[in-house]
Amino acid sequence: MSSLNLKGIWIPIEILTDDKLSDKEKIIYAIIIYLSKENQYCFLTNKTISELLNISVTQVSNLINSLKSKEYIDTELIYKENTKQVEMRKLIPIKNKYTYLRKVKYPPQENFNTPIKENFKDNKYNNKINNKYNGNNKIYKKNMANFEQRKYDDIDLTRLYANADAFI
């Protein structure tokens, strides 16, 4: 812990007032931001953080994973040559997840300033567009729910029912 060279931390108001983070997560995140000012990342072990905050290594691991899942930090593992053993872990703070270069090239736009065109607002009831028939602008009766109001040709309607014998 002597190699940490940490005299104190300053917690920005954005982190302090963030409701998504617990108190321990806020402290760990502030430490990661402070130590990564030079290189944009820092090397911190779970044991170092646990000794600093007086909590268990397992709890530190859970807090780091929580910060990662909430997209406040990113981790990069550096392995020993020709092995699967982890040599170091980079902790990379994501100060603003909308300005951080993510896997998506174009982030989603938050505010759309283009208005909806007048013809597209409610196309369901726009009879001038929907009821054109062969270039004729005749508007037909809408919402005829009862089949008796409709005009049918000479069709035997009894064949349409499943139990046609019951109606004859």
Image: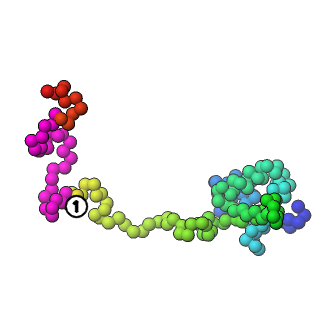
- 122 within the magenta span: no
Residue closest to the far right: 2
Q: Position of residue 78 (x, y in %)?
A: 78, 65
Does residue 135 appear left or right of residue 103 in this picture? left
The answer to whether 140 is drawn above or below residue 74 in the figure is above
Does 63 sit above or below residue 89? Answer: above
Rendering coords of residue 132 (x, y %): 18, 60
Judged left or right of residue 98, residue 152 is left
Residue at x 18%, y 35% (from the top left corner):
159
Give me the residue at 53% from left, 69% from top.
106
Amino acid found under the numbered disc labelled 1 = Ile
Query: Would residue 32 be seen by someone viewing this image from the given angle?
Result: no
Q: Does the magenta stretch mainly form a helix, a strand or a loop?
A: loop
> Toward the viewer: 153 or 141?
153
**Magenta-colored span:** 131-158
Closest to the observer: 91 or 76?
76
What residue appears at the point 73 percent right and 71 percent down from the top-left corner? Answer: 40
Q: Where is mark 1, residue-wise?
A: 129
Q: Secondary structure at mark 1?
A: helix
| Residue 64 shown left or right of residue 142 in the figure | right
Which residue is most to the bottom? 38
